[in-house]
Image (spheres, rainbow, N blue to C red):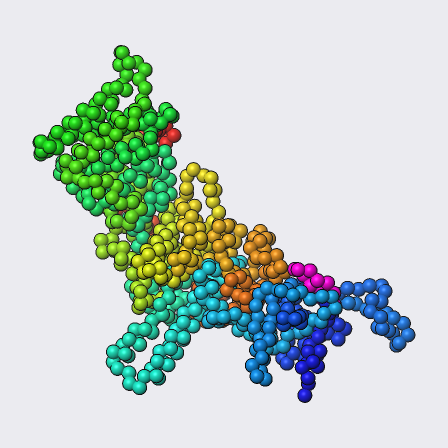
Amino acid sequence: MITPLAFADSLRIGSVDFVSPDEIKVLLDVEAPSDVALNTGVPRPFPRISSYVLLPNDSGCLVAQIELITIERSQYPKRKGMQDFGVIDLPFPLRKMSLTPLGVLKEQKNGKESTYSFSRGVDTFPTVGDPVLLPSQEQLKSIVESGEKRRVKIGTSPLASGADVSVDPDRLFGRHLAILGNTGSGKSCSVAGVIRWSIDAARTTKEKANKQLEELLSEVTDEMSERLGRNSFINSRFIILDPNGEYSKAFEDMENVRLFAVEADKGKNIRQLHVPLWFWNSAEWCAFTQASSRAQRPTLIQALRSVRDEQIDVSASLPSHNMRRYFRNLVSMLKIEYANGDPWAPTFPKKKGFYDCLLAWQKGIVDDTSFSDEERKAINSFQHKLGEMIAAHTRTTTNQYPTFLYDSPTVAELFRLASSAHISFGGSNQDILPIDADTPRRFSGEELLRSIEANGELMGTSEYIETMLMRIRTLLSDSRMRTITGCDEDLTLEKWLDDYICPSDSSNGAITVIDLSLVPAEVVHIVTAVIARMTLEALQRYRRLNDGKTLPTTLVMEEAHMFIRKYASDSEETPAYAMCTQVFEKIAREGRKFGLGLVLSSQRPSELSPTVLSQCNTFLLHRISNDRDQDLVNKLVPDNLRGLLRELPTLPSQRAILLGWASELPVMVQMSYLNKEQRPQSSDPDFWDTWTAHGDNSRKADWEAIAHDWQEAGQITQEDSIILEEDPGEVAAATDDDNLPF
């Protein structure tokens, strides 16, 4: 029987030759294995890049990763005693290794048995001459499988004799995961696999718990059986934003997976994608319409405030209703103007702009025989004051150079009279800007158009909003976009949240796949941003209403470089793609607090937003060959781990490097296998099979059907033409937004 000391001595492969905080150099013994180690209990390759070795110290064993293996040759002998037939010393090649320290492996005795635990960080470094050992099979397994709550197996370690690589889902999804790699490297399969394996592991654990509960109960009542059955649902939430339509069939074998796409198909259980216009907030509307910050944006925001107010009937045509709505909007704008101090601002355009607003407000006041005496009295008082303010600053023979400066008391009095008129027509102080412009209350596109036009007249910006109105009319008339953004009467906010995020018991499935492949390019970034933002805000409100408890949800963004890309933050205008990026940046920064985890998948990490990428605490890196992408990845990991990343350009498919918060140490992973029907539809095109196909297997192109589908997609119907009715001259007369009244 071999003694422990003799066994340890048999595992010795060399001694420490150089020590620094981030690098340890080792001089290998002549007897050290040169290709396969047979002395560890199980034959395994050695030496091997990225494998592990041990350096005994006072606290246990320092675990180090092999970064470099080399042979040093010299013309003179460096090792005395290496003699030719005992006559003369000969030069002998020296084998050396460079190691990266990772952590400490500690032994724990339990009777005669020993267990090992690994922890990151090094408290004691070795010194020159200390021995270097190969880890035993049990030690190697303990290193790779270290950590608590490793509940989800994602693969095995080829450098640790096939030891299981498992992760803690709380760490994996709670602090965001980035899966990066070139196309064809297995990146999409890893995304699908991580989701599937997590749900399968949760289901297995829950079934075991239910079975144990049944065994504990001598008699299971019908009520208990029903409760156990209901409790079998996996209360997980994965929302996959799929821009290429790869995941439509990846989860077909799983129960009640919800699939949404532009074109519904009941036969394939594909439901219609709905992201209605009334979901969009003011920032998203401004990004879509490219509204200018000086005139168009204030008008649009004010219009959204008005149209979202359900206390005011937008479609009402009674004169009293119209005047109430008129004075309500007027009071709202006066309130904003007064708060900003624009009437007495030192700059000329703002002062002149307020004067032009007074002229527009005067034109908007109408009289009607249906008005009561009280209503007429309120109107006359307001008109009288308005006339005084206009006359005081109108050019006359005696006042040829009027100033446009108004003092605070004068504007305050005008505000008081407007408020009195609003109340006399049935309004109240509570319905003055009662809700935020971003509150998701129902309205139609036609109602928004009318609201913009009405508020443009009140604010004196009618001539500057035509281009914005044209963009909205285009949105409303395009049949492709209308199917997604249209106002479905049956769709409520509650139903949308129920369908897309799923009910609390997850009875209709744990996965939502949103196919964005046919979403028009004009709105794809806005639609993606709205879905992501609505998910975040829903979870924020869930936590507030549930005493700080969160509803863990994972948002998966495929092809993230298309939707979360860099943008110029100093730009005055915010394009749609930048708006989308800003939403995901907010999720990356704040999502963890509300239970929203983020999974990014991208083949171009160098194009991703630095803010989002910096918030990802776990990385699953497949083959990356581009030098810019490699440089970026190198900057994301600690300096002492960059040696492992040198393998990125040569990684085969299905193999990846796992590092970060979800893994105790960086490890090479052979990802678990997915059946063909479980993989996303992202395989390479089969050119050869197509070239050599015969008969029924040959692929014919029905260009007539394709052309018909293509051309009919944006056809304007008779219903649409009503929306587009307007004087062509008005569109042509739309002026540049730079020539603004204020």
Asked if residue 312 can be seen in this view, the reply is: yes
Q: Position of residue 424 (x, y in %)?
A: 14, 35
Q: Position of residue 89 (x, y in %)?
A: 87, 70
Residue 730 among those drawn in magenta: no
Magenta residue span: 17-27
377 left or right of 460 in image:
left
Comparing 3 with 324, the one in front is: 3
Up the image or down, 267 lies above or below 724; here it is below
> Residue 552 is drawn in which quadrant?
bottom left
Q: Residue furthest right?
A: 87
Q: Position of residue 510 (x, y in %)?
A: 36, 66
Q: Residue furthest top?
A: 397
> Residue 103 is drawn in which quadrant?
bottom right
Asked if residue 157 can be seen in this view, the reply is: no
Q: Residue at x 63, y 70 (%)?
A: 59
Comparing 569 with 247, the one in front is: 569
> Residue 303 is drawn in which quadrant?
top left
642 left or right of 415 in image:
right
Q: Residue furthest bottom?
A: 1
Q: Residue at x 31, y 40 (%)?
A: 301
72 left or right of 339 in image:
right
Q: Residue at x 41, y 66 (%)?
A: 250
Quadrant into which the C terminus falls = top left
Q: Position of residue 58 (x, y in %)?
A: 65, 71
Q: Residue at x 28, y 79 (%)?
A: 225
